[in-house]
Image: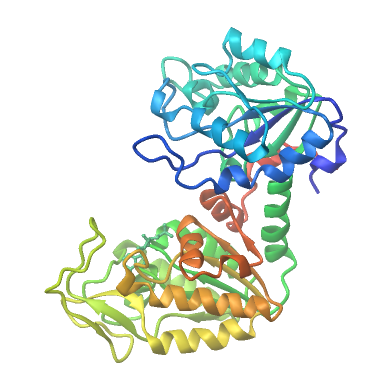
Amino acid sequence: MKKTLSDIDVKEKKVLVRVDYNVPLDANLKITNDKRIVSTLPTLKYLLNENAAIILMAHLGRPKGKIVSEMSLKPVSTRLSELLDKPVKFIGGDCVSVQSRKAAADLRPGEVLLLENLRFHPEEEGRSISGEKDKNAMEAFAKELASMGEIFIQDAFGTLHRSHASTAGIVKYVKGAGVGFLVEKELKFLGEALEDARKPFLAILGGAKVSDKISVIENLLNKVDAIIVGGAMAYTFLKSRGINIGSSLVENDKLDLSVELFKKAKDRRVDFLLPLDHIVTNKVDFESKQVPCEAIVKVTVDEAISEGFMGVDIGIKSINKFSEIIKSAKTILWNGPLGIFEINEFSKGTVEIAKLVAEATDKGAISVVGGGDSVAAVKKAGVDKRISHISTGGGASLEFLEGKELPGIAAIPDR
Ligand code: AMP
């Protein structure tokens, strides 16, 4: 068990907090979704209550080691100030400049400072100024960041799978370190789902590619009682069983692996469920996310899809079959949509599954939903408040589900 915020004396200390403020901005640099900022408030309010001086470290976008003014964290400091109802100091340009260091040095208990985008510095991601991999440059940068505070709190779940200066490197240069409340909650739900799940344990996986989720499936096959695979991923599995999939998305180089995964599931007595029918179309515009008016959209009678048509959502037979499994599950883990849910006509399967997961949760199941698209799907279905836990980091939660140790967690000392 890793040290958490409540294990550490932060009273009136200068506390460096790594947060995930990688929020979406529109063309006018207005934040379009502030969920990531809001989710850090429990940690920040606790620290303010302890009269700590808070120095926030974050990144935004991919500036690739250069100062890119559109990727400044300035809009975040404004929003955070509104949410905390107090001023948030912000120095633009460079997070370790003389001015930034002075602001950190002058920071008083109960005050908040947000440092500028860490990724304006190539050292954050382990590169030198000239762009080459350079561990020493990363160490020196981590040390510089650490020198601005006394305690380090890791609360950026979305970056835990990165071994960067501010996520892992910094820990050895501070007097004490632990995870914040957001990361603690993520580890509790994802960790309990994997290690201590109430049975039957069901995993629902969807999304674009089998290749992105192979290791997740492999790891989950050791833990779950049933696995439902939908979305484009399902077509590679169906093809590997000799079923006609028309022009659906497929990864032909993953057919053998799909056969192997089926065999593993059978050996481990894991129920491996694929769609029994599909919504198919002969035309879809992926760019504009539109169905052209001349397109034919229909439902198949069974798993097979005829030539010229592609599967874009699960059909009603599949929804009914999956419904039985979802209703009987006590732990449900869901990552990835079951169809092209961004297009209204093809969102029904994903939305219905979201509602079924919420109903199962109302009746006592633990549900954990991760990955940006599945989170968007539970919101679209209007059931996000009824899910036990919505994971904030797509890549990090996938790596966690793969059973990998995340560098941002590994670095934190045990209790
Ligand atoms: P991922 O990031 O792997 O979770 O994939 C999410 C994407 O998969 C979404 O943009 C979906 O539109 C897409 N997707 C889901 N089902 C299908 C499908 N049947 N055909 C094509 N794309 C799909």
Splitting the image into 4 quarters, where does residue 270 fall?
bottom right
Q: Relative to 299, is 168 on the left or the right?
A: right
Q: Quadrant of ligand 1?
A: bottom left
Residue 179 visible: no
Name the residue located 58 percent from the left edge and 52 percent from the top edge: 392
Q: Position of residue 347 (x, y in %)?
A: 37, 72
Q: Is residue 346 positioned above or below 276 on the image?
A: above
Q: Relative to 397, is 53 on the left or the right?
A: right
Name the residue located 48 percent from the left edge and 63 percent from the top edge: 374
Name the residue located 20 percent from the left edge and 62 percent from the top edge: 285
Q: Is residue 122 positioned above or below 251 on the image?
A: above
Between 342 and 328, which is closer to the camera in this rendering?
A: 342
Name the residue located 67 percent from the left edge and 38 percent from the top edge: 84
Q: Relative to 87, is 173 on the left or the right?
A: right
Residue 119 visible: yes
As drawn, the residue found furthest toward the top would be: 98
Q: How many marks?
A: 0
Q: Is residue 298 positioned above or below 393 on the image?
A: below
Splitting the image into 4 quarters, where does residue 361 fall?
bottom right
Q: Position of residue 27 (x, y in %)?
A: 34, 37
